[in-house]
Image (cartoon, helix red, strand yellow):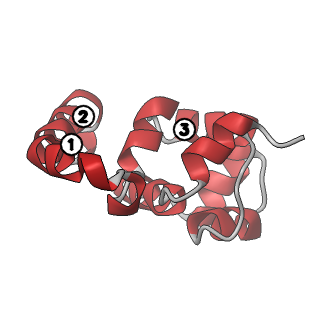
């Protein structure tokens, strides 16, 4: 059975790129992260390329190993295609401030 939560959050989001970006910022190889999450490196590679959609339990483990709360990982994976056309202007006004806030709260030590 497909989790409707994942359908909502992975339909257009760039979740794989967010995972890859934060893995690299932590200085982790794909192999290291995959091993710590008890998944294969090839599966992680497919996740990072958005060729596979991980289940919620795998996403939870990935977010824990990346030291990112899962909702923040979802937020960091948003891209322009995720925002409804009617909300893009408002999103454009607040997106940089929101990103800076999230970075300062959750990633300050990783972004220095």
What separation in Å lies between label 1 and label 3 (alpha carbons)? 18 Å
Mark count:
3
Q: Label 3: state its secondary structure.
A: helix
Q: Which residue is mark 1?
A: 99
Q: Residue at x 78, y 46 (%)?
A: 38
**Where residue 112 appears, x then y in whole percent?**
15, 47
Q: Within the image, what quadrant is residue 59 found in?
A: top right
Q: Within the image, what quadrant is residue 61 found in?
A: top right
Q: Do residues under tags 1 and 2 come within 8 Å of each other at their CB atoms?
A: yes
Camera-near label (1 vs 3) is 1
Q: Within the image, what quadrant is residue 67 found in?
A: top left
Most foreground residue, 12 or 101: 12
Q: Residue at x 40, y 35 (%)?
A: 72
Q: Which residue is mark 2?
A: 102
In the image, which disc is placed on residue 63? 3
Of all residues shown, which one is farthest toward the right? 1
Residue 11 visible in the snapshot: yes
Left of 68 or right of it: where is 108? left
**Where residue 14 appears, x then y in whole percent?**
48, 60
């Amino acid at each position: 059975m497909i989790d409707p939560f994942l359908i909502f959050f992975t339909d257009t989001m760039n979740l794989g790129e967010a995972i890859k970006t934060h893995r690299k910022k932590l200085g982790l190889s794909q192999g290291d992260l995959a091993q710590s999450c008890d998944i294969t490196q090839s599966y992680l590679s497919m996740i990072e390329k958005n060729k596979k959609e991980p289940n919620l339990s795998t996403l939870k483990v990935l977010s824990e190993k990346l030291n990112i709360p899962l909702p923040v990982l979802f937020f960091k994976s948003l891209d322009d295609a995720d925002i409804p056309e009617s909300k893009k202007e408002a999103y454009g006004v607040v997106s940089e401030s929101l990103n800076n806030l999230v970075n300062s709260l959750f990633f300050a030590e990783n972004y220095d």
